Amino acid sequence: MVEWITSPGLVPYPLACAEMEARAETIANGVASEAIWLLEHPPLYTAGTSAKPADLTDPDRFEVFQTKRGGQYTYHGPGQRVVYVMLDVGRRGRDVRAFVKQLEAWVIATLDQFNIKGEIREGRVGVWVQRDDKPLTPERACAEDKIAAIGIRLRKWVSFHGISINVEPDLSHFDGIVPCGITEHGVTSLVDLGLPVTMADLDVALKRTFGEIFPD
């Protein structure tokens, strides 16, 4: 069975990393069950293993944390649901690419609960939505925005880190980085798309769709 954990308030990033690593170790050792941890962080930037220094455009805006997850720079903050996935990928097929695709499919299935069509793009990690309501500009080459980011790490075939989905964050906070190294597209959220979705609503949808994508 997968344990679902929801933390109130804002969880400090270093504490979350320490807790994830400890839980992943106990899962690998067969002592603890798999877990999904739902939380929010204070405003911060994280740098994945592929992060480029030039993509941190405002280094003094928020605290920056180096992290060993895959990916580049990303933002975490209030109004964004962070979903840390501590799952036994060894038991679930030992295929990292397939696992990432499952995470993408989980986000897409969750967004579909709110009649939002999430899509993936070749060469761009994360989940995207069409924004036909926004005009194209020289800086904005395509009418689509990113709504969810994905970055994981594995140790002993147990995953940690995971997904972030924008519910109602301050989207201007993304201006201090080039999110995931992509300059031609914007960032959006459920509320920015005109949906009065709460964090609790999203959590219900995440739990409802999880079993469809990750059967026991």
Image: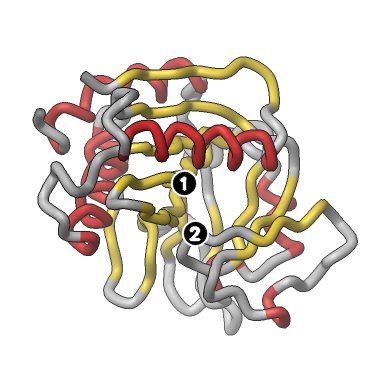
Which residue is found at the position 42% from the left and 62% from the top? 144
Residue labelled with disc 2: 69
Which residue is found at the position 22% from the left and 38% from the top? 109
Q: Place residue 98 in its image quadrant.
A: bottom left
Q: Secondary structure at mark 1?
A: strand
Image coordinates of residue 78 in percent, x first then y, are 67, 33
The image's colour scheme reads secondary structure
Looking at the figure, which quarter contains the N terminus? Answer: top left
Q: Nearer the viewer, residue 151 or 146?
A: 151
- As measured in the structure, the alpha-carbon distance from the residue carrying label 2 to the one carrying label 1 is 7 Å
Q: Nearer the viewer, residue 136 or 39?
A: 39
Q: Is residue 68 visible?
A: yes
Q: Secondary structure at mark 2?
A: loop
Image coordinates of residue 134 in percent, x first then y, are 51, 60
Q: Is residue 67 left or right of residue 146?
A: right
Q: Is residue 129 visible?
A: no
Which residue is found at the position 46% from the left and 57% from the top? 146
In the image, residue 32 above or below residue 171? above
Query: Dot 1: few (<14), some (14–19), or many (≥20) neighbours within 10 Å?
Result: many
Query: Dot 2: few (<14), some (14–19), or many (≥20) neighbours within 10 Å?
Result: many
Amino acid type assigned to the residue bearing label 1 in the image? His
Q: Is residue 70 left or right of residue 93?
A: right
Which residue is found at the position 64% from the left and 52% from the top? 75
| Image marks 2 and 1: residues in contact by CB distance under 8 Å | yes
Q: Is residue 25 left or right of residue 139?
A: left
Q: Place residue 97 in its image quadrant.
A: bottom left
Q: Nearer the viewer, residue 130 or 39?
A: 39
Identify the disc placed on residue 161: 1
Image coordinates of residue 173 in percent, x first then y, are 73, 51
Q: Earlier in the sequence, mark 2 or mark 1?
A: 2
Amino acid type assigned to the residue bearing label 2 in the image? Arg
Q: Nearer the viewer, residue 137 or 164?
A: 164
